[in-house]
Image (cartoon, rainbow, N blue to C red):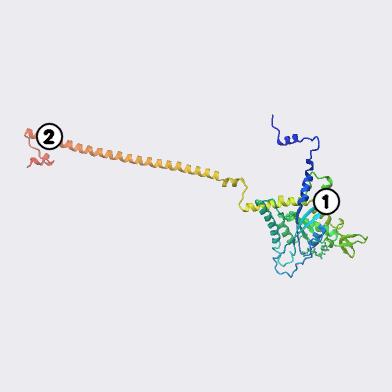
Amino acid sequence: TTPPTSKALSGALRKKLQGYVGFANLPNQVHRKSVKKGFNFTIMVVGESGLGKSTLVNTLFNAPLYPPKEHVGLSQESPKTVGIQVLNTDIEENGVRLKLNVVDTPGFGDFINNEDSWKPILETIESRFDAYLEQENRVNRSKITDTRVNACLYFIAPTGHSLKALDIEFMKRLHNKVNLIPVIAKSDTMTNEEVAAFKERILMDIDHHKIKIYHAQHYDCDDQETINETKEVMSKVPFAVVGSDKAVETSDGRVVRGRSYPWGTIEVDNEDHCDFVKLRQMLIRTHMEELREFTNDIHYENYRTEKLVALGYQQDQTVFREVDPLAKLAEERALHEAKLVKMEQDMKNVFQQKVQEKEAKLTQSEAELYAKHKEMKDALEKQRLDLEDKKRRIEQGRPITPEKKKKGFGFANK
Ligand code: GTP
């Protein structure tokens, strides 16, 4: 019999309880803890000066969060100074605390040279990632303050044309670092038809330049109503917004947040007038947690990986093998052993050759000696024979022949 797979096992193990145990209360426990701890949310507003960024933030949170600020105008000389302002506020609704941080980037686009105006904005996002990374690496990680930017509202001027080169540059620089949410600023200055056509062109530009904007997700566990709502919210991107923190009176006597014109009133909270309600719904009511999640799981994780890789940390297996000290040692030892074997063989060969040479030399000198010895022996033998012949003649009284005199028997002549 084959063992059951883990999936089958977990399915088989999922038993129906016979009565109330209590862990169904877990979401409530999480809720209580979260309420106690409060939530952190950091929103960044990016766009040209005077597009209504601070007004919209006030309108979103229905509070005068923004103190009246000085507008950075063309009088400011340095084209590189893009002053980043940070606004930290604690707001509370029905006992739930929200620590809201607004990062404002006033003034970009005001200068003659706007080439690098995205830099300080990107640096702000990255420095917040760095601060988080640094806290994560501490010994004590119990008190981490999260100031990472969770969403970036990118304000597009209501020109009715298409995205400006500067907008494209900005979005491309930011899209991998933050959840980018494009909004059409001051949409009350355009007609409904103009807004629709402008949205289409912006989306085409975004698609063409492969700019990644934030897409609110829906999940399998969501009910049909939530799924439809999320789809509807996404159908409004880029959100055409109108901001106003002032109450105005409509022609039918209602007091609303809006903007009054000679021809009537634009109501901020009226979905027929603008997309403000849908933007707020996504940003605050339905997808704030997802924006925080995406920040952590996608943007921060990518940044962290890039940073650690740049610092020399590697996760790739092949690289690991290269730097594995044990493998390297074994490789070095094998090389060394091969070298020793070769050296030994070379030495043997040389020795063999030397022995052979010596042997050949010895054989040769032996042969030479032998030849010399034989020659001397032959000469002596011949001398002995001559002497014996001479002795015999003397004994017989015969004279030595002149031929023999010539050969050196001189004593016969004396
Ligand atoms: P900087 O801080 O200088 O970058 O400006 P900002 O983008 O924060 O703009 P701010 O909110 O200060 O608004 C600038 C002007 O635009 C103010 O006079 C607002 O009343 C006006 N304004 C803001 N929102 C809207 C809007 O939706 N429609 C219209 N028509 N005017 C708006």
Position of residue 148 in the picture relative to residue 284 (left or right) = left
Numbered tag placed on residue 232 in the rendering: 1
- What residue do we see at 45% from left, 42% from top? 340
Which residue is labeled 2 in the image? 389
User: Which is nearer the eye, 259 or 377?
Assistant: 259
- What residue do we see at 12% from left, 34% from top? 389
Point out residue 152 in the picture as x, y percentages from the top left corner: 75, 57
User: Which is nearer the eye, 227 or 280?
Assistant: 280
Q: Amino acid at mark 1?
A: Glu
Ligand 1 position by quadrant: bottom right
Q: Is mark 1 within 8 Å of ligand 1?
A: no
Q: Residues within 10 Å of mark 2 (few under 14, many from 20)?
A: few
Residue 126 location, quadrant: bottom right
**Residue 380 visible here:** yes
Point out residue 278 in the picture as x, y percentages from the top left corner: 83, 54
User: Which is nearer the eye, 149 or 321?
Assistant: 149
Q: Amino acid at mark 2?
A: Asp
